[in-house]
Amino acid sequence: MADALLSVRNLSVQFTTYGQTNPVLKGVSLDVPARSQIALVGESGSGKTVTMRAIMGLLRSPPAKVTSGEIFYDGRDLLTMPDRERLKLRGTAMSMVFQDPMSSLNPVFTIADQMGTILKYADRRLGRSRSGRERMARVHEVLGQVRMRDPERVARSYPIMLSGGMRQRVLIAMALLSEPKLLIADEPGTALDVTTQAQILKLLKDLVEERGLALLMITHNLGVVRETSNYVYVMNKGVVVEHRPTAELFEAPRDDYTKALISAVPRLTGGTSFGNAGAAA
Amino acid sequence: MAQESHPKTVPTAPPRRLSNAYQNWYRFSRNPTAVIGAAIVILAILAALLAPWITPYPEHVGAVVNFRARHLPPSAEYWFGTDNVGRDIFTRVIFGLRISLLLALVVLGIAIPVGTTLGLLAGYFGGWVEVVIMRLTDIALAIPPLVMALAVAAVLSPDLINSMLAIAALWWTWHTRLIYSITRQLRTQEFVEAAETLGASKFHILFREILPNCVSALAVKTSLDAGFVILVGASLSFLGLGIQPPTPDLGTMVASGSAFLPDYWWESVLPGFAILIVALGFNLLGDGLRDLFDVQEVR
Amino acid sequence: MEFLLFLFRRILWSILVLVGLSIVIFAIARVVPGDPARMALGPTATAQQVADLQEKLGLNKPIVEQYGMFIAGLSRGDLGRSLLTERPVNDDIRDTFAATFELVLATITLAFVLGVPLGVAAARWKDKWPDTLVRVLAIFSAVTPSFFAALLLQILAGYVLHILPTTGRLPHNMEFVAGITGLLTVDSLLAGRLDVFGEALRHLLLPATALALATMGQIARITRSSMIDVASQDYIEASRAFGVPEPIRVFKYMLRPSFVPPLTILGLEFASLIGNAFVVELVFAWPGMAAYGIRTILQKDLNAVMGVVMVSGVFFVLVNLLIDVLVGFVDPRVRIRGSR
């Protein structure tokens, strides 16, 4: 799938801490075609978060070091392109939905301030310009798109004034500000209660489908995988152990690790409680 | 399980005691600031204790006058030079350390037991005990120790004992606040609750369960504080409220030497550096202990 | 609304602290072994003179009544009469407080203007040379006694380099009467006297630096650790992922939440700052409250001493209230919830 929107080829990353070097990713490959919904599933420590951070260019080196591989976005290798070019893509063409709504928003600035700042510098990187008023209009528009009832009021608020679910929607809105083509979601809603998480995932899926975005969902939760993806990569100990269409994986897992993973989830027989809650929302 | 347990098997607190003394010593010895700090502190204490035997002119401690040798710059004979009546400044500085260290010892000797006990009580019992004690610390915090010492000196008489008492009367606040915050965190922990369930006495819980867990924080705080008490004491004697002449006192020496600035700079600058070095020693030691025990809450 | 409640609560506590303070001060003044009137007048005074003064000061009334009088006076802002200057203590303190206030204000400004950027630099280049430099600086500034820093600065800038004046607030030959604020730097600007302003500033520089050193080191240290703490927060990582440039991240998103701990530290350390101001004023012959305080203390002038301690305490309490307001302004969590 060389024509995929995002294509990770044979990526290896190692971490050096206290003089010890550990390989964390060992030749990971995955593809995210345009308009597809892909899940990357694994336990903590499997390397899924490092993969995500490598794609977003958020790895800090040291201690991290990419030892081999390429990450193609739209046919261009992110790892070899100049920093300036890469910055143009980060937060704009490819954007990220953060995991923890309680800690991912700056507590001392209003939502409008934080979203406005993101938009301002995204515009600047892309060579666009908008007046402050136009920026605010866009902020309100996106907050409306994530189904906020009163976008103006939300924009004026500080994070502490919003509920967890609302903050998570703000995080989604932030990712959507510059109309990305690829959305990377890092277990959104795990910090919330089950019902709210279901609503958030439903919202995310709707938005992705409405706007024709590609979604890469990073998660450890197979329920989430089933609800939000049609193709899945399973990671364990820094390698992709299995990748197939989601439905197929749940019917007949091939890899032993995947089997163990699936059997560890009790609610997979019959309808998931999670799916019902999502439908009710 | 709990019913079967004898009070002796109360799950005791996991205090960072010196159980692995060697490991602690190893980590301590690898921390250069801590080692330098400890070296300075030990040297200062030894010098103060052995002052009569290691100083070149121990008789210069008193009201000796030697006008031929007045205002001499530092030399091989007089390492720190001589003062306006011809006394060896090095000798007087070493003897001056005695007063500074004594001050720290007395002030902290009063402030630590008082402050720690109040902090334990406020943190463990809460309620009106907490309100009364913590409001008292708020009041004490509002008075500058130096100003308090001045005021006490005004109504009593300006001497060392009164100054020490005045400083100690305010210094306990810092220990109370520290122990209070630790105790509040520990109060709800399992080993304390277990001891409560088993009917341990309040005294046992406060002093045998909670206090041992405050020891490392106290050690850090004590070391840092010793430096600061010495600084406040030096400021007092600089203002003329310390021990009365001719007994050598570092702050007093800086004050009297400053009358001869800038020509005879050594008379004030070198005793000043002596204060700085001793305070530095305690500070570095405190910093090193903080790294060693990993107690971030202590400033 | 919650913020008003929070402030209201803080004001109540402050009043309580002040009442406690007044009791402490009163107690100190009355534990005198011996008779304040006798002490003030000296051993040569006659019994009649002592009795007269006792009568005048109300020393022959019951102790509770004396405290009542003291409090009544305080609530009217009346600190009684100084035995030394034979003027109301209020007037004496008003004349000298402005100089102290100007010095303390300049000190705080200096401590923040230097301390915060140093702390930011140390955090930005953690474990590199700027960090080491700031650490050494912070330790040395903490262990240098203020009077010694004052003397060293005086020697260096005044006697060796001859670049700055070492005593007083203005040159002796300069005619200028302070106006409404009592702060020479402000009053001179209001009066349009730039020459006076320049001189006032030059005189202020050395004492303020000597006094600011300790606080500056603390602020740099706290700013550093709180910046490092904030830097590891998810929201900073998020702003990085959204492509917010580093200068904005550091100076806006990290600095503002990091600003609360240094402010709190300033509040706690303010008492020792006032204490140190006493010593520094003495070294630089700064005509402030300290000089007055020390003079009256040596004369056993009780009313004046109590006044000076009380005013120091009130100053401390007011500064801490102001800091609470500032913290609420910086951190909406305090404003909205009344806590962090």
Image (cartoon, grey):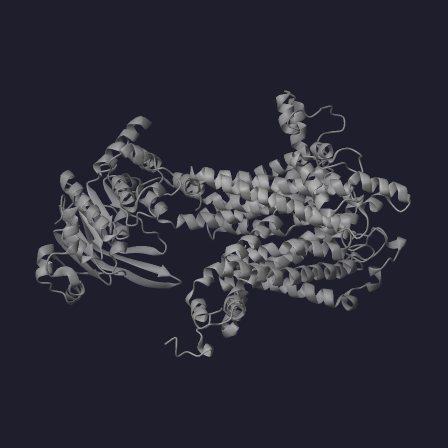
* Residue under the point 35% across and 51% down: A60
Left or right for B36, reference C303? left
Quarter in which the N terminus of chain C is drawn: top left
Work out whether C151 lies above or below C77: below
Left or right for A163, reference B49? left
* Residue C178, image x, y percentages: 69, 26
**Can residue B266 be seen here?**
no
* Residue C10, image x, y percentages: 52, 42
Work out whether C239 lies above or below B223: above
Viewer-side residue, B89 vs B199: B199
* Residue under the point 47% across and 41% down: C6
**Can residue A6 be seen here?**
yes
* Residue A179, image x, y percentages: 22, 37
Viewer-side residue, B108 vs A210: B108
Viewer-side residue, B276 vs C132: B276
* Residue under the point 63% across and 55% down: B171
Left or right for B181, reference A83? right
Q: Which image quadrant is residue B190 in?
A: bottom left
Viewer-side residue, B256 vs C37: C37
* Residue A197, image x, y percentages: 23, 50
